[in-house]
Image: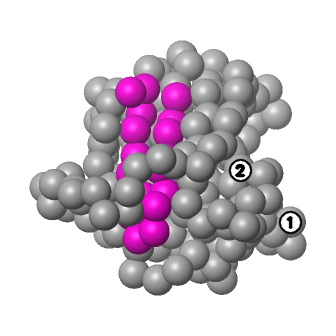
């Protein structure tokens, strides 16, 4: 967990993989607030950017422990199943831009300021032998302007998470 409470704008990149698990999430968490008090040890607030080895990519917003699905790609060609995957987010309020393995997937627009400014990575275990391997994680301050023009067609609210979908597991 990186506590960057003084910086609301970030570039955060994590290179990770899981060799055995197909269906559980491998996650990068931004603008979050960790909480070990929940039964699942999931973060209490923040944005989860997830991929699974079945090539699904999702973004979830968590506020006060309540999960809202923001975006879903069911078959994302950018995911390398069981191989190294590099998730990169650039957060310049009110935008959160997302790349996976160098492929720009688009952005989401925040409707309110983040609750907290912690960063981290996470996974849902599935089983004890299904470890998440992290090669590296790095954070920096972005050099691009919050006034950069974004293509409205790249806004990731165009493919919402399916009705009744479960939060990351």
- Residue 43 in view: no
Q: Residue at x 35, y 69 (%)?
A: 109
**Image position, residue 48 (x, y; %):** 55, 57
Left or right: residue 127 versus residue 142 is right
- Magenta range is 86-102
Which residue sits at x=60%, y=58%? 30
User: Which badge, 1 or 2, comes first in the chain's sequence?
Assistant: 1
Question: Which residue sits at x=30%, y=42%?
Answer: 105
Of all residues, the one furthest to the right in this rendering is: 37
Residue of label 2: 120
Residue lying at 15% horizontally and 60% vertically, measured from the top left: 152
Image depth: mark 1 or mark 2 in front: 2
Image spot of residue 162 (x, y percent): 31, 62
Q: Tag 2, which secondary structure?
A: strand
Contact check, label 1 and label 2, Cβ < 8 Å: no
Q: Is residue 25 above or below residue 119?
A: above
Q: Residues within 10 Å of mark 2 (few under 14, many from 20)?
A: many
Residue denoted by label 1: 36
């Amino acid at each position: 967990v990186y506590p960057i409470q003084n910086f609301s704008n970030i570039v955060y990149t994590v290179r990770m993989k899981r060799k055995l698990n197909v269906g559980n999430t491998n996650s990068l968490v931004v603008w979050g607030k960790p909480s070990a008090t929940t039964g699942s040890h999931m973060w209490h607030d923040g944005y989860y950017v997830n991929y699974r080895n079945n090539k699904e990519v999702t973004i979830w917003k968590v506020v006060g422990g309540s999960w809202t699905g923001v975006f879903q790609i069911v078959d994302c060609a950018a995911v390398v199943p069981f191989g190294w995957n590099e998730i990169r987010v650039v957060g310049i309020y009110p935008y959160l831009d997302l790349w996976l393995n160098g492929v720009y997937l688009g952005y989401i627009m925040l409707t309110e300021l983040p609750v907290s400014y912690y960063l981290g990575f996470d996974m849902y275990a599935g089983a004890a032998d299904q470890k998440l391997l992290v090669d590296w994680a790095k954070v920096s301050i972005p050099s691009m302007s919050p006034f950069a023009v974004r293509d409205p067609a790249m806004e990731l609210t165009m493919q919402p998470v399916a009705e009744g979908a479960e939060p990351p597991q």
